[in-house]
Amino acid sequence: MNNNKLSVRLLWYITPLVIIPMAIQGIFSLTNVTSSSEKQAEAIVTRFVEQQVNKSQNFTQFYNSIIELLSASPVLNNYLIYSYDENDKPSKERTKLVSSLVDEFGNYVDSFPHILSIGVINPQGDVLSYYPKAVLETRDSYPFSNQLTNNRKQQNIFFISENDKTSIYLTYRLFDSRFTLDSPKVLGYLIFHIDSDEIARSVANDYFSDTVNFIMDNTGKILFCNKTDLNNNYVSEYELQLLKKTANTEEFNQLSLHTLADDTRMILANSMSNDLYFVTALNKNSLYKAGQTITMYTALLILSTAIFLPGIIFLVVRRMLLKPIESLAEASHKVGDGNLNVKLPQDRKDELGMLFRDFNHMVNQIKQYQTELLDYREHLEEKVVTRTQAIAKINKKLEKAIVEAEQANHLKSRFLANMSHEIRTPLTAIMGFTETILGQESNNKKAKYLSTVLRNSKHLLELINNILDLSKIEADKLEVETRVVELMPFINDIKSIIEPMALDKELALSLNIDYPLPSIIHSDETRLKQVLLNICTNAVKFTEKGEVAINVRYSPSTEKLIFTVTDSGIGMSQQEQERAFKPFEQADISTTRKFGGTGLGLCIAKNLAQILGGDITVTSKLSEGSKFEIIVATNNQNHKVAMVSSANSAKAMLKEESIAHAQQFEGNILVAEDNKDNQDLIRLLLSQWGISPDFANNGAEAVEQALTNDYDLILMDMQMPVMGGLEATQMLRNAAYDGPIVALTANVMKNDVDAYLEAGCDKALAKPIDKVQLEQTLQQYLSLERDSQQNWEELFQGERFKQISDNYKSKLPNLLKQIAQLNEQQDLNELLALSHSIKGSAGCFGFNHISDAAAELESCIREHNEEGLDYHILKLEQAIIFILNLNEDD
């Protein structure tokens, strides 16, 4: 039953898999066969017509050469001269010349059967001599004599209708040989009357029975036609132009000619010499009949293949695959019933043969296992003793593993105790000083307490970040972003952070640079700074007196940067050095109590250094200090990088950077921002660089203003009413706007930033706005103007910023009402938009705890975390209430 189902399914799948490609291939083949057969038929007829045209042209050209040959005859020339000067010659000589000329003409008429007569006329048209093939035929004149007199051509051909037949006359102008080329004298014209049957036969030669062939002149007169009733008829002027146009293309055209009883035919026209045209008109069905037959046979072949091929494939597959599977299933059933004497044939060399051999091998193994089982039962007691001894060995290993697990558990217990201490300490400070502030302390004490709260909050954040970093490293999910890092400002930044810490402990801090160094490296600046600050702060932390030295050098052979941090602190033993980079481990409990810490810093730093293409090593002695060597890759292999060769060069670079940060810019900027407070803040920030921006309240206004004004830079908020920044950016790019667009957003996750860049943004700036990043963006897209006399400290201490900040504070009660109202209405979409707006705007005014709470609420709504929704709403409300209470105390 199953095999039958498999057969049906196989046939069901094979049929469309064969028929569909065959149908596609058949359509393609039929199209090609039809096209090829039509082109082949046209080519055959075209070659046939060309042969007939060449035959006619060769016929006339041959007799043109004959008449030219006769025109050079001395006998003819003497006769013409005599006729011109007849009065000066005796009659006896004239008789002799006439007799010679008649003999000459007779030789040509006898030699060339198509010459019906040869005549000579004088310039006035009088016949001087005439020799016909028919003995009794005479001629007094030619109907085209006047045309010869007015024609300047040496040779001419005339087609004259005579006795229901078109006659061909070839003429040749004869000159007096006694005259020079400068003053030729025409003595007469030599005329051949040619039999036109040869040309008529070329026209009458039909490739198809219903073909109409005819030769017409430039006026449209039909001179020769295989349909004799059309001879000497004229085609219309319109048809004449169509036929001439067709002759120029030399291709078949489907035309309807009134001359052919308005039949629509396939017309092929060829241009001949002497302003003649050879025209062939064929019936379309006759032209393509052979091709239609081929097409029909091809269609039948494809159809029969599509019908019979699936059946043939099915029969082959059934014979080669389904029947062997049936045999295998039957054998498997017998083995399942306990019959191990089954054996499949092994003569096949394909995969099924291999499957049969494996099946036979499996059956043999089962037989062997049954034999071993019987033997095992007979020797069970002996094997129990052996197994008992083995279990004893395993128990010893298990006891050792338990001891190691207890040690590991002890280490984690110590880690949790340290973490509890480290987290509780800043939490105690945060909670205590916050309660004190709420207890109506003075403003000076509030500032001091808030500073303590901020410092402990940062410490708590650092602890949590370390735990998260370690978790990401162990899960192999820590991401790094490789970007250009300017090395000298980076080193100077590290020094500026460590130097105040060293001064607080009265330690000497030295920075020693071994030049040359690359001016830039390609690395993750944030993670590299995290590594160096961890090592350097540890060096200061564990050094009570003496010095801390930071040495920097570059290895050209490995293209790596090497930082060496040396201190004169407490040092480490060899055992402590081996444990230094393991998580949760510290030197000893006493060290933990004295210096604090979680034991995660060095572990994270080492892992980060390895991710950055390097490593960290340590050499140390107890009570003599430690030396940490941090190696990171520069990743400059595919980049041309300038080298900093001396300390003076480094100072010059730092000076240039400081000067650059003091510059103002010039340029037109459009800011798309729906929040009025943010608009005031951004206007205030940009004014420090001498910039007065234009504002748009939504994406639609931004698109309209950008397309009607010339802006050097657009700062585009991503979440706005009417039209968001993402849609506005896409619309501008689709409208061929090529100016720089920078996204302003509180969503700075990598996938969000990638979406902004894909939509057409050149880069993204995070909210709250970082002044360094904003300044770098202005440097990138705007030109510098002049030095600024103001600084950022003055900006944020100024009355204008205080006014904007107070204005934002005044709107906080309304925000509280909106949050409560939206929560009561369960309008999560509006609550999501409001939390996103608060996240960006509150951070811009320094209310980071409000911004963080709004960000957490936004994430909660996006992740559909209904359980945590009330908590995050309450947290945001309390953060706003806290600021309002501070404002009332002030």
Image (cartoon, rainbow, N blue to C red):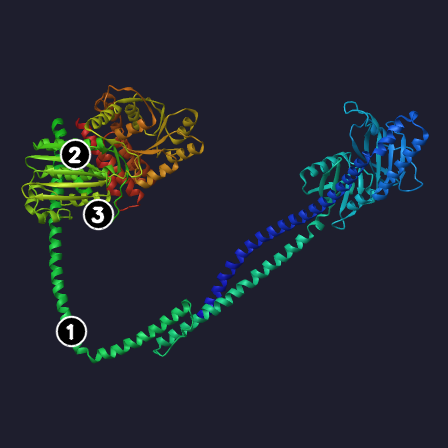
Identified by mark 1, the residue type is Thr
Name the spot of residue 608 as percent of width and height, x first: 21, 43
- Residue marked by disc 1: 386
Quadrant in the picture for the N terminus: bottom left
- Residue marked by disc 2: 454
Relative to residue 852, is residue 280 drawn left or right? right
Closer to viewer: mark 3 or mark 2: 3
Q: How dense is the environment of label 1, judged by Cα within 10 Å: few (below 14), some, or many (20 and up)?
A: few
Q: Is residue 290 above or below residue 810?
A: below
- Residue marked by disc 3: 471
Q: Nearer the viewer, residue 327 or 119?
A: 119
Q: Is residue 266 above or below residue 886?
A: below
The numbered mark, 3 or 1, whose residue comes first in the sequence reads 1
Identified by mark 2, the residue type is Leu
Write the residue at 11% across / 56% down. 406
Q: How dense is the environment of label 3, judged by Cα within 10 Å: few (below 14), some, or many (20 and up)?
A: some
Name the spot of residue 880 as percent of width and height, x first: 23, 34
* Residue 877 image label: none
